[in-house]
Amino acid sequence: MNIDRRKFIGVATAGGTAAALTSWFPAWAQPVSSGITAPLPTVSGTDIRLRIARQTLRVDGKVSRAIGINGTVPAPLIRLREGQNVRLSVVNDLDEDSSIHWHGLLLPFQMDGVPGVSFPGIKPRSTFVYEFPVIQSGTYWYHSHSGLQEQLGHYGPIVIDPKGADPIACDREHVVVLSDHSQLSPEAIFRKLKVNPGHFNMQRQTLSGLLAGKDQPLKERVDWGKMRMDPTDIADVNGSTYTFLVNGYGPKDNWTALFKPGERVRLRIINASAMTIFNVRIPGLRLTIVQADGLNVRPVEVDEFQIAVAETYDVIVTPIDDRAYTLVAEANDRSGMGRATLAPRAGMAAEVPPLRDRPLATMKDMGMGGMDMSGGAMAGMDHSGMAMGTDSGSTSMPAGSATAEAMSGMDMPGTTVPAAGAMAGMDHSAMGGMNHGSMKMRDFSVAPQVDKNAGVQTISPMPSDRMAEPGQGLDNVQHKVLTYHDLIALDRNPDVRAPDRSLDLHLTGNMERFMWSFDGMKMSDHHEPIPFLEGERVRINLINDSMMSHPIHLHGHFFELVTGKGDHAPRKHTVLVQPGGTASFDFTADAVGDWAFHCHMLYHMHAGMMRVVSVRPRGEAP
């Protein structure tokens, strides 16, 4: 905080030191006089009308531009029932094309709402009618897939009640939509990222941090500098420009969810952010995870969970005491937080914990998770040999090496799955003698399918499966944090066949130029879809060659995470791939059509990290 000394003394004299300091507190830490308990507006039935239009949005007393639906941000809660048909007439009152994608819903691809992939978009001053059967239940959401409109407030929640009894019993429920909002236009944000990807990073290491022992030792900082990498680069856009919202309200607004002590309260939590991964906790309450991405899981108790952009988690809490609790949604780089309150009565507030120390990236985040890090992450390595622009000449673990480990965790006796191409013929015993001094950070020999161009800054030398980890900055917290390995499907998977084949996909980018892609190919430069045949079973190995997290979303399908849970593998539509890590999933190509497949970080997708998955009927050429 940069506080003018004379101004501070003057205010302190007039109103007291405590009152003077209040205005300098960050928004999430400021006291509130009363909570906002207004429920989300709701629409339901078989014939629903939605109107997309520009509006203003007031957050913590500040007014800014927004795009809303039916005059609200978030858009209205759409409440449906499994087994019904729904007709949604969407009016576009903007001066530009728009769209709505029904995130996580299984429907005909023509109704999926992705311009240029499944339909032409909704022209200005026109109406498009979405019509489809509702064949599932759970917590989902909807948002624009046109330009950067999602950042401006074009998103809303969906709740689909099951046609039978709900296995998740509760006395009360609240929908909690997390998001990020900036006074800057999304176009301005994107321009700044292209000019200087570190523009919003106000958490760089300092001399005072070094002297206080909060930052890396000087030698490690020098080593990172030689590699042109910044260990504080955790989030591209963060609290330096964002206010983090809960149901459209800022931290000072203090949105409040009411309860009666002793009730089982279900929180349907949706991360509708453009760019923010949240770490969610409610100090003083245990959280029971009962649903992930709309599908039920066996209840698992945790104290905190990380929710990536586009994920949903349903949580049960049972507050016993007649007091308020703070719901904390802390940005994963610790640059700010969304804040709300659970309370027996409106106007109550609980203590808001301070932001925790910001995390620093490690060598594992650079794709060196297979190295022995004892004695210091950088010890003994010749960083001059980690050439960013060298294409060959190194000895390193193939980027698909997580495949064997992931496949060994599957409970499928008597089945054999082809290993990823990078594994073929590899002599693992030779890894013990690896010469770290010759390791390259851009060795295309371990990722031959990746296009060699300026948009690929690094290839992870030794990526590791990180699905058993809680997420950046959460390794050393003193309580239980959810991991993907904790999730077990409540019901047996509908398809338990072994995969017919496997496919490696590299998540690639150039962080210095803010360029993002799959296998080095941007959506705008590569129009060939990724082909699949209807009904085939495929293992997808996602290999993150960058130092940034990527929540990867597949439209029109659910997939099973490969975490050793056999026929009860957790089924999701979005998976977070940690920096320098891998994540594997199996999916059945059971929905014919063209489907978007992309990183759900809005500006990553906008910069090129998107492809089309094409599922063709049997008998047609792929």
Image: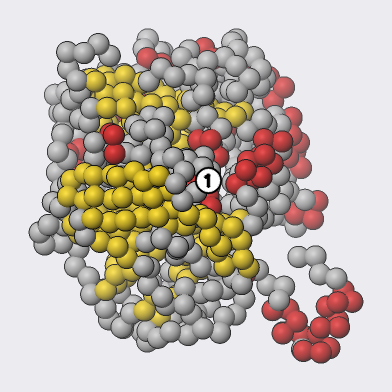
Expressed as whole percent of the image width and height from the top left, the position of residue 103 reads 34, 45
Name the residue nearer the viewer: 262 or 76: 76
What residue is disc 1 on?
A: 95
Name which residue type carries label 1: Asp
User: In the rendered image, is residue 368 in sight?
Assistant: no
Expressed as whole percent of the image width and height from the top left, the position of residue 342 reads 41, 76
Judge whether 469 appears above or below 417 on screen.
Answer: below
* Side of 63 where 227 appears, left or right: right
User: In the rendered image, is residue 106 in sight?
Assistant: yes
**Residue 318 in which image quadrant:** bottom left
Q: Secondary structure at mark 1?
A: loop
Image quadrant where one finds the N terminus: bottom right
Name the residue nearer the viewer: 495 or 53: 53
Residue drawn 56% across and 62% down? 56
Name the residue nearer the viewer: 470 or 61: 61
Judge whether 223 appears above or below 297 on screen.
Answer: above
- Marker count (numbered): 1
Residue drawn 60% across and 80% down? 31
List the single residue furthest toward the front.
Answer: 125
Name the residue nearer the viewer: 534 or 443: 534
Residue drawn 77% across and 50% down? 206
List the single residue furthest toward the left.
Answer: 164
Expressed as whole percent of the image width and height from the top left, the position of residue 298 reads 22, 54
**Residue 59 in which image quadrant:** bottom right
Residue drawn 21% across and 60% down? 45
Judge whether 321 appears above or below 132 on screen.
Answer: below
User: How packed is label 1: few (under 14 Cα within 10 Å), some, or many (20 or more)?
Assistant: few
* Side of 162 where 307 appears, left or right: right
Judge whether 212 appears above or below 589 on screen.
Answer: below
